[in-house]
Image (cartoon, coloured by chain):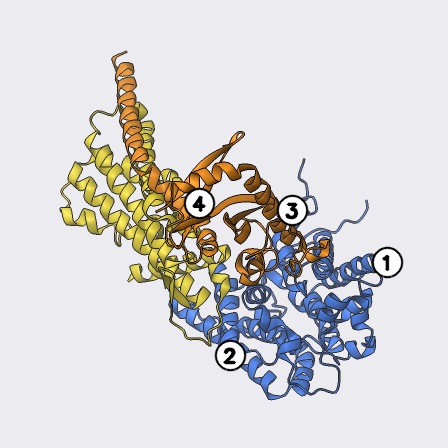
Chain colours: A yellow, B orange, C blue
């Protein structure tokens, strides 16, 4: 493991950006990207869980017996997810109402368990922290990009804190297919395609 | 064998740690969450009913036991006098129960207004009971002496067009609130005195 | 011994029959022309504009996707042009330009090229594009309001919508022969029943499409509509109107028969077509949408892989 520390962080932003490169954790990606606000909220919640669980798993990696490691990871992840859920309910209730069931579902998000299993349980605390942070920010950014595309074409405006900022002007007729579920699949597919095209060069 | 013990110990410690942390955060956020739920689910309806109140009705609330259920009453203070109370009842709507916040003026025994909190009615039809201010405005300042009905049933509330069932549900919930109010009037008066400023 | 037919493969040289994908596409375009020309006659320059834009952008999207994915350029085979033409035919003549461009993007890129180009698409690209646009912009497919400003020599009432909202009363003023001759409003190339019918028969005779699908589609529509009509003649219009209005005829001959999304054997083809016809009438009579042909075709596209499992027993195969 001679990789420079910076690389552990930056790989999450491009080389291993979760939904587009690893193609992991697609359930929230498809479900909550109806608006940029939701996407970023979900991304931040996931990032928090990722960083915390990565650090803790990495701290305990010598103590956790390999036979029950998955159970241990799940306990750790579920704890932090519940923390996020309670905090979000207390301080950002409208966002919690919109994200709904997808906050508890972070527990079964492949990215979180995947980073614990594949990275944090084999690397030092600081490296795991950087890895979690990088992947988390990458995840947040991808959600934001996907949500921005969908919201922009689906409603013609971007909404922040209940204030719509019209981008296309009043004559734009919303392409409401984009904020429906099939639109999420199509949009994700097209973004994946663009990512691959850019990456190939 | 040693490994077995280690597994059990590690898992137990982890679970204890997790349980402790969660209990701590839960107790720390419990009150705030309760307030937030009230604020965002019932808040809009309460604020609409208590328009012009000088206090925060969501903070000024009390509970009264009604058989097995505990009812929460919100207090509205007008001109330094706590004369408004609001509480939630429900009526059978088209798509399930329609939750209704009913505000009553204790001094003059009349309705202050109603506001739909939770519902599963058809968007654009029954859902108008929540969004159409003209419908809710009909419930303002009506005396509580007579039962309230839609005009199809001989009352004087104009039902939302295409949503008679929802309108009936709102009326039924209002009447139910009236019954509850009469039943607890004495207790309510006692409680209200403590909010006098 | 009874004489048996066997598959015989002879030695080279082989001789090409001349039937190619390109030829197939151009013949289909040719067969669609009568209906298109009548549309031009009634709706004038706006219809020409919509159709030209549709064909041009369809080819352009195909070219762009060919270049971006660095694959051989396939705009010459006429398939993109055919998709553009059929898509344009389904639109009202007053379709705004941006909707046409979005539609052809959906048809070519999402409907066809994403799956791997010609012959690989799971759905009919045209039906897919129209369905997505109908979901997003319902108003643009409301022919009554879209064609409001036209002063035509016949009633500017979209018959299938009138039937939906007013039952049999709504279509009482329409004469079946007028409907068949295209004297009704609708998409640019969907109203001229005779022209589409002749085009379809031409394609069947040349062997480009199969009569089983078209015939069973029309039969499915007729029989289902007949049953509905039998139960409530006031609410449900008579089956002949179902055949001659909306997208029924263009659906039966040009959309349902699209090659890669329709089955290959006789029995599956019959089931496929009939299912499409039944779905069409079900959506029209009981569903939320005015015309069910597009959605019905997407549904039968979905069941086509299952239908293809019904096939003759392989020679010499022991069960």
What's the chain of the residue with tag 4? B
Q: Which residue occupies 67% across, 63% down?
A: C293
Q: Is residue A189 above or below residue A55?
A: below
Location of mark 1 (residue):
C230
Q: Which residue occupies 44% across, 36% down?
A: B63
- How many neighbours does mark 3 have within 10 angstroms: few (below 14), some (14-19), or many (20 or more)? few
Could you tell me how far apart the alpha carbons at marks 3 and 2 are, in whole angstroms?
A: 42 Å
The residue nearer to you, when weighing B169 against A153, is B169
Location of mark 3 (residue):
C309
Location of mark 2 (residue):
C97
What's the chain of the residue with tag 2? C
Q: Which residue occupies 13% across, 42% down?
A: A2
Q: Which mark is residue B74?
A: 4
Nearest to the eye among marks 3 and 2: give it.
2
Looking at the rendered structure, whether the residues under marks 3 and 1 are on a common chain is answered as yes
Looking at the rendered structure, whether the residues under marks 2 and 4 are on a common chain is answered as no
The tag earlier along the polypeptide, 3 or 1, is 1
- Residue C19 visible to the viewer: yes
State yes or no: discs 3 and 1 in contact (Cβ < 8 Å): no
């Amino acid at each position: 493991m001679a990789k420079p520390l910076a690389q552990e962080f930056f790989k999450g932003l491009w080389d291993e950006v979760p939904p587009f490169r690893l193609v992991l954790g697609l359930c929230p990606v498809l479900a909550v990207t109806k608006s940029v606000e939701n996407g970023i909220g979900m991304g931040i919640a996931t990032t928090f869980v990722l960083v915390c669980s990565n650090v803790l798993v990495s701290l305990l990696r010598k103590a956790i017996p390999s036979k029950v490691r998955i159970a241990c990871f799940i306990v750790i992840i579920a704890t932090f997810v519940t923390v996020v859920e309670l905090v979000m309910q207390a301080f950002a209730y409208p966002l919690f109402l919109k994200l709904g069931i997808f906050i508890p579902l972070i527990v079964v998000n492949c990215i979180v368990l995947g980073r614990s299993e594949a990275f944090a349980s084999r690397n030092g605390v600081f490296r795991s922290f950087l890895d979690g942070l990088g992947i988390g920010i990458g995840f947040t950014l991808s959600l934001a990009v996907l949500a921005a595309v969908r919201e922009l074409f689906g409603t013609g405006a971007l909404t922040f804190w209940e204030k719509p900022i019209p981008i296309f002007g009043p004559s734009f007729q919303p392409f409401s297919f984009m904020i429906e579920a099939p639109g999420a699949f199509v949009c994700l597919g097209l973004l994946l395609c663009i990512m691959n095209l850019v990456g190939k060069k | 064998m040693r490994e077995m013990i280690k597994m059990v110990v590690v898992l137990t410690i982890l679970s204890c740690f997790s349980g402790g942390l969660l209990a701590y955060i839960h107790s720390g956020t419990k009150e705030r969450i309760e307030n937030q739920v009230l604020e965002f689910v019932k808040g809009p309806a309460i604020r609409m009913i208590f328009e012009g109140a000088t206090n925060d009705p969501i903070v000024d609330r009390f509970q009264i036991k009604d058989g097995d259920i505990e009812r929460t009453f919100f207090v509205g203070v007008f001109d330094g006098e706590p004369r408004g109370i609001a509480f939630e009842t429900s009526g059978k709507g088209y798509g399930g129960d329609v939750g209704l916040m009913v505000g009553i003026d204790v001094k003059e025994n009349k309705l202050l207004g109603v506001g739909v909190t939770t519902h599963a009615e058809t968007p654009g039809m029954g859902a108008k009971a929540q969004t159409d201010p003209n419908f809710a405005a009909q419930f303002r300042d009506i005396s509580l002496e007579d039962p309230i009905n839609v005009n199809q049933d001989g009352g004087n509330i104009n039902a939302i067009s295409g949503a008679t069932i929802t309108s009936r549900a709102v009326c039924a919930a209002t009447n139910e609130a009236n019954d509850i109010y009469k039943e607890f009037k004495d207790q309510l008066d006692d409680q209200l005195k403590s909010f006098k400023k | 011994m009874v004489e048996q037919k066997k598959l015989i493969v002879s030695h080279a040289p082989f001789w090409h029959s001349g039937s190619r994908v390109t030829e197939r596409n151009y013949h289909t375009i040719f067969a669609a022309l009568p209906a298109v020309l009548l549309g031009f006659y009634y709706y004038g320059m706006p219809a020409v504009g919509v159709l030209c834009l549709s064909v041009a952008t369809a080819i352009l999207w195909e070219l762009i996707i060919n270049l971006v994915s660095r694959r051989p350029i396939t705009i010459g085979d006429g398939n993109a042009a055919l998709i553009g033409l059929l898509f344009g035919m389904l639109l009202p003549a007053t379709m705004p330009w941006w909707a046409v461009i979005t539609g052809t993007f959906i048809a070519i890129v999402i409907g066809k090229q994403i799956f791997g180009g010609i012959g690989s698409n799971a759905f009919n690209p045209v039906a897919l594009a129209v369905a997505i646009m109908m979901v997003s912009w319902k108003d643009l497919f409301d022919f009554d309001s879209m064609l409001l400003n036209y002063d035509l020599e016949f009633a500017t009432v979209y018959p299938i919508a009138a039937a939906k909202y007013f039952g049999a009363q709504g279509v009482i003023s329409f004469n079946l022969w007028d409907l068949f001759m295209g004297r009704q409003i609708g998409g640019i190339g969907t109203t001229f029943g005779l022209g589409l019918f002749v085009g379809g028969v031409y394609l069947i005779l040349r062997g480009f499409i199969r009569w089983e699908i078209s015939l069973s589609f029309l039969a499915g529509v007729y029989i289902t509509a007949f049953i509905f009509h039998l139960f409530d003649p006031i609410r449900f219009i008579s089956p002949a109107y179902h055949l001659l209005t909306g997208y029924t005829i263009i659906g039966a001959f040009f959309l349902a028969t699209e090659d890669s999304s329709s089955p290959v054997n006789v029995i599956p083809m019959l089931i496929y077509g009939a299912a499409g016809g039944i779905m069409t009438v079900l959506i029209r009579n009981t569903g939320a949408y005015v015309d069910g042909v597009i959605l019905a075709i997407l549904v039968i596209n979905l069941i086509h892989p299952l239908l293809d499992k019904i096939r003759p027993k392989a020679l010499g195969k022991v069960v």
